Every structure is written in C-alpha cells, then in structure tokens.
Image (cartoon, rainbow, N blue to C red):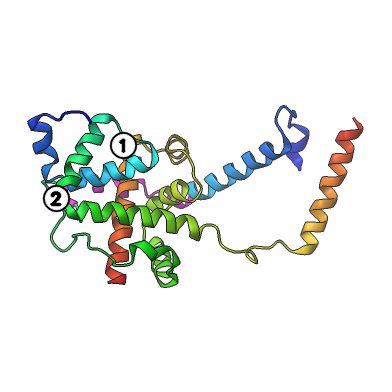
Amino acid sequence: MENLSDQEKADMLDNCRKATLLIEKQHTEGITPIEKSELEYHLDICEMCNTFMDQSAVINQMVKKLSHPGKNESKLAEEFKEQLQKQIDAKLNQSSNE
Amino acid sequence: MKGWEKFDRRSSEKTWLTAILKNKIFDAYRKKSNNLQKQTISINGSDTDEFFEESGHWKEGRYPESFGIEGVALENKELDGILKSCMKKLPPLWKSVFTLKHIDDESSENICVQLELTSSNFWVISHRAKVSLRDCLQKNWI
C-alpha cells in the first residue's frame, strides 16, 4: 500500500464522492496504487461507503442476472426463420462451390 | 445479405454478423441519447449535486443504509422488480451508458467513442447512474 501524505489523507477524510467514484472505477478499469490507498484509507473510517460498496456489487450482479432471462423470450416468427435459413443455405452452397 | 458480397472472408461469418449487430445496437443507443448530452454538463457542478455536500460527504437524507438482505439479494424477485423500475427512471444517456457497461460488457473506450463522450464525462455518468440506482433501491425497499 502506498503511503499517503497528510494532505492526501485530509482530502479523502470526508470525500465520499471521490470514494464512491473510485469504487465504480475499480470494478471496471482498475485504479492506480495511489487511488487504491486513498480508497482504503476512506473505507477504514466510513461505514456508509462500505455499505455503498457492498450494495454496488450486489447491483452489478443483479443487473447481470436480469440481462440473462430464461428461455421463451424473444422468439422469431417460424416463417421468417425458415426463409432466413433458406437464404443462408443458398449463400453457403454458393460460396462452397466457388 | 446485401453486404455479403463485399465481405472479404478474412474473418469468420460469426465475427462479421456480430460486428453488424453491435453497430446496430450502438445506433439504437446513440439515437436514444442524442440531444441529451447537455444534461450531463450540469451534473459536474457541485452546487447542483443532489447526493454530496461540497466537501464530498454524503448529504443528509442521502446516507446509504443497509437493505438487510445484501447476502440473499440475488434470490429476491421483489428487489429485481424495484431495480428494473429504478433503471427506467434514469435519464436516457445515463441508462445507455449503464446498460452498455453492465449488461453488454462494452469497454469504456468503446462506449466513449460510440456515444461521443469524454472519459471524465463517462465516469461522472457511470458514477451518477450507480449512486442514483442505489438511492432509488433504498427508497423503495426499506
């Protein structure tokens, strides 16, 4: 863990806005070692941002789950599928004959 | 099928079709988000910040509280329903960014290019979308 200067610590003391932004960044891109230290320093003293972090992870998982619904959803009309399949078959035959 | 003749077969058919679909999806998101870019500029100012004090601390009345079911939230249909309606309430551009990032697993660079966002604006929006969603869940759950 990087050592933070007194100024950097003071800047993070009450900065829930920055802490929650870093939480969001950490999930997607990763954050720099300094940012990691800033976040850890803040999370050590802020109960609310710990709650936020847990819930943010839960939301990410829930959204993932919602986006993979069960079967029986969005089916193409049979007629359209048959027609498309014929078109694809025709093109495939054509290209394999080349 | 029209573009098939121009497709030079350097990549597989699957890659070709996936690329077409991806472009279609981005077109749809871009359409939805158009003319709403201006909306994001005001959220940069701390004076209009709905959730945080100027110091950066949570505003009173916006403090995150435990839902009490974090461990089993994934099994909870009711919470799913609340999350869905909360997502619908997001401004269109935020929703596009959030959906592309969390559901379509697009890279942030790609989202920035496609939706014509700067990297810092992208992060402001991602952050705001998450803070708003969480707040909405708390309000409707507890």
**Label 2 marks which chain's residue?**
B
To which residue does mark 1 refer?
Answer: B120
Residue A59, placed above or below residue B44: below
| Residue drawn at the location 39% of the way across and 64% of the way down | B73
Q: Is residue B36 magenta?
A: yes
Q: Residues within 10 Å of mark 1 (few under 14, many from 20)?
A: few
Residue positioned most to the right: A97
Viewer-proximal residue, B45 or A27? A27
Residue A84, placed above or below residue A39: below
Q: Main structural element of the magenta stretch: helix, strand or loop?
A: helix
Disc 2, SS = loop
Q: Is residue B37 visible from the viewing direction of this image?
A: yes
**Label 1 marks which chain's residue?**
B
- Whichever of labels 2 and 1 marks the residue nearer the N terminus, that label is 2
As shown in the figure, which amino acid type bears the numbered disc 2?
A: His
Q: Residues within 10 Å of mark 2 (few under 14, many from 20)?
A: some
Q: Are marks 2 and 1 on the same chain?
A: yes
Q: Is residue B34 visible from the viewing direction of this image?
A: no
The residue range painted magenta reads B31-48
Direction from residue A55 to residue B75 in the image, left or right:
right
Give the label, 2 or 1, closer to the camera: 2
Q: Is residue A18 magenta?
A: no
Instruction: Examine the image and state in which quarter residue A74 appears.
Output: bottom right
As shown in the figure, which amino acid type bears the numbered disc 1?
A: Ser
Residue A3 at x, y percent in the picture: 16, 28
Look at the image and tell me in which quarter the C terminus of chain B lies. bottom left
Q: Which circle marks residue B57 in the picture? A: 2
Look at the image and tell me in which quarter the N terminus of chain B lies. top right
